[in-house]
Amino acid sequence: MQIRLASDLQTDSIVDGEGIRTVIWTQGCPHNCAGCHNPSTHSFSDGALVDVDLIKEEISKLEGQTGITFSGGDPMCQAEACASVASFCHEFNYDVWCYTGYTYEQLLELSKTKKSIMDFLNQIDVLVDGKFVLKEKSLDAIFRGSKNQRIIDVQKSLNSKTVVLVSKYYEVNEKKKNKLYI
C-alpha cells in the first residue's frame, strides 16, 4: 500500500497537537480553503508516493516523540493508508491526532459508503475538524487555525454517539488574560 505525501515526516513539532509530535503531511485536499497555511498540499498529483511500510519503519525509529499527527492536505482523502499507519503508531503508544477539513458529522456520513473512513476514525484519538475559515482566523484558538474548528475526542464521541470536545482546550486560561479558547 502507498500513501501520497507532501514532504518527509516532520519531527519535534509542538504546534500540531499536544506534546512533541511527528507530523505526516499528506498530499491532496479537495477543500481549497482561502488563506490555507499549506496550499502546496492541495494538488492530488504533486508530492511523492511512498510505501506505507517505509513510513512505519521511520516511525519505529523515532525517539523523544509523544504522538503522531496527520495533516496535509486532507488525510481523510487517503483514509486506508492513514488508518494502517495510525494503527501501527498505537503499537508504540503514540497518541494520534488528525486535521481534516471535513466535519466529524460529514465523516460519519462518508463512512457509510467508504469503510476506510471509519477504520481511520477508530485509530484517531483527537480530531481537529472543519475547514479553515479566514474570517474566523484566531491566534488564540489553540491547535486550530480558525474558531469554527473543533478539537474532538474521537473515541469518546464514537462511544457516546455525540461530539465530545476535548474540554481543556476550551477552558479559561489565566495566562492569556482569562480569554476563552473558542
Image (cartoon, grey):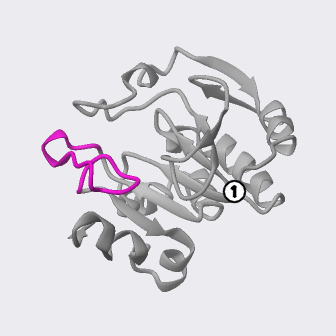
Q: Residue at x 56, y 23 (%)?
A: 6
Measured from the top left, where is residue 110 in percent x and y? 44, 54
Q: Does residue 123 appear left or right of residue 57 in this picture?
A: left
- The span picked out in magenta is 132-147
Magenta-span inclusion, residue 139: yes
180, above or below 50, in the image: below
Q: Residue at x 82, y 58 (%)?
A: 92
Q: Residue furthest top?
A: 46
Q: Is residue 9 visible?
A: yes
Q: Residue furthest left?
A: 135
127, above or below 80, in the image: below
Measured from the top left, where is residue 51 in percent x and y? 78, 28
Q: Which residue lies furthest to the bottom in this view?
A: 160
**Which residue matches tag 1?**
66
Viewport quadrant of the C terminus: bottom left
Find numbered disc 1 in the image and state the secondary structure of the residue it sits on: loop
> Which secondary structure dominates the residues rendered in magenta?
loop
The one of 30 and 129 positioned closer to us in this rendering? 129
The one of 57 and 101 positioned closer to us in this rendering? 57
Q: Residue at x 22, y 68 (%)?
A: 177
Q: Can residue 182 be seen in this view?
A: no
Amino acid type at circle 1 is Thr
Q: Quadrant of residue 36?
A: top left
Measured from the top left, where is residue 126 in percent x and y? 52, 63
12, above or below 89, in the image: above
37, above or below 174, in the image: above
Measured from the top left, where is residue 30 in percent x and y? 37, 32
